Amino acid sequence: MMIERIEKTKIMHRVVRHNGVLYIGGLIADDCDGGMGSQTRQICAKLDKLLATAGSDKTKLLSATLYVTDIDAKAEMNEAWLEWLDGTDLPARATIGVATLGGPTVKIEIVVTAAATE
């Protein structure tokens, strides 16, 4: 049973690969001054890079959990999300409203699993 860990931070690895599945930890935007759409787009760009680093891409997403601090901004988040995915190859998804995400300007954090390209 091989476990590969990719891109270590102080508290976690951003990606863990096991049995053909990529687990990508919670990602937030680098610039949290923007609104929900801006932050979602930034995270999606990070996901593109991490998936490519791990040898996969967004068409292989299996599931996504989106944690948001303002559920009323869900439409703005969905617009950015669907722009990124082109409305195709959509993963199973849950959006969960939370009180805070570690800072007053952080509006969204995304966790995904994806199939690894063998």
Image (cartoon, rainbow, N blue to C red):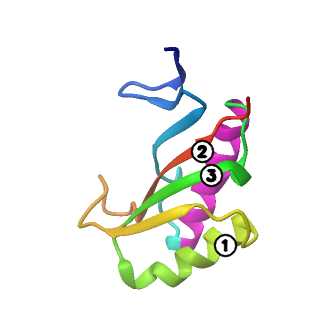
Residue 59 drawn at (x, y percent): 73, 53
Residue that numbered label 2 is attached to? 114
Quadrant of res 72: bottom left
Of marks 1 and 3, the one in the foreground: 3
Q: Nearer the viewer, residue 76 or 18?
A: 18
Horizontal side of 46 relative to 24 (left or right) equals right
Q: Nearer the viewer, residue 59 or 32?
A: 59
Question: Are the residues at dot 3 and dot 2 in contact (C-beta closer than 8 Å)?
Answer: yes
Residue 42 in the magenta stretch? The answer is yes
Q: Secondary structure at mark 1?
A: helix
Horizontal side of 43 relative to 74 (left or right) equals right
Please tell me whether residue 56 is drawn above or below residue 67 in the rendered image: above
Q: Residues within 10 Å of mark 1 (few under 14, many from 20)?
A: few
Question: Are the residues at dot 2 and dot 1 in contact (C-beta closer than 8 Å)?
Answer: no
| Sooner in the amino-acid sequence: mark 3 or mark 2 | 3
Q: Which mark is residue 82?
A: 1
Of marks 2 and 1, the one in the foreground: 2
Q: Is residue 32 visible?
A: yes
Q: Amino acid at mark 3?
A: Leu
Q: Which mark is residue 117?
A: none
Quadrant of res 108: bottom left
Give the residue drawn at x 36%, y 76%.
70
Residue that numbered label 3 is attached to? 61
Please tell me whether residue 6 is drawn above or below residue 65 in the rendered image: above
Give the residue drawn at x 69%, y 47%.
48
Residues rendered magenta in the picture? 37-53
Residue 54 drawn at (x, y percent): 67, 31
- The CA distance from mark 3 to mark 2 is 4 Å
Residue 66 in the magenta stretch? The answer is no
Q: Secondary structure at mark 3?
A: strand
| Sooner in the amino-acid sequence: mark 1 or mark 3 | 3
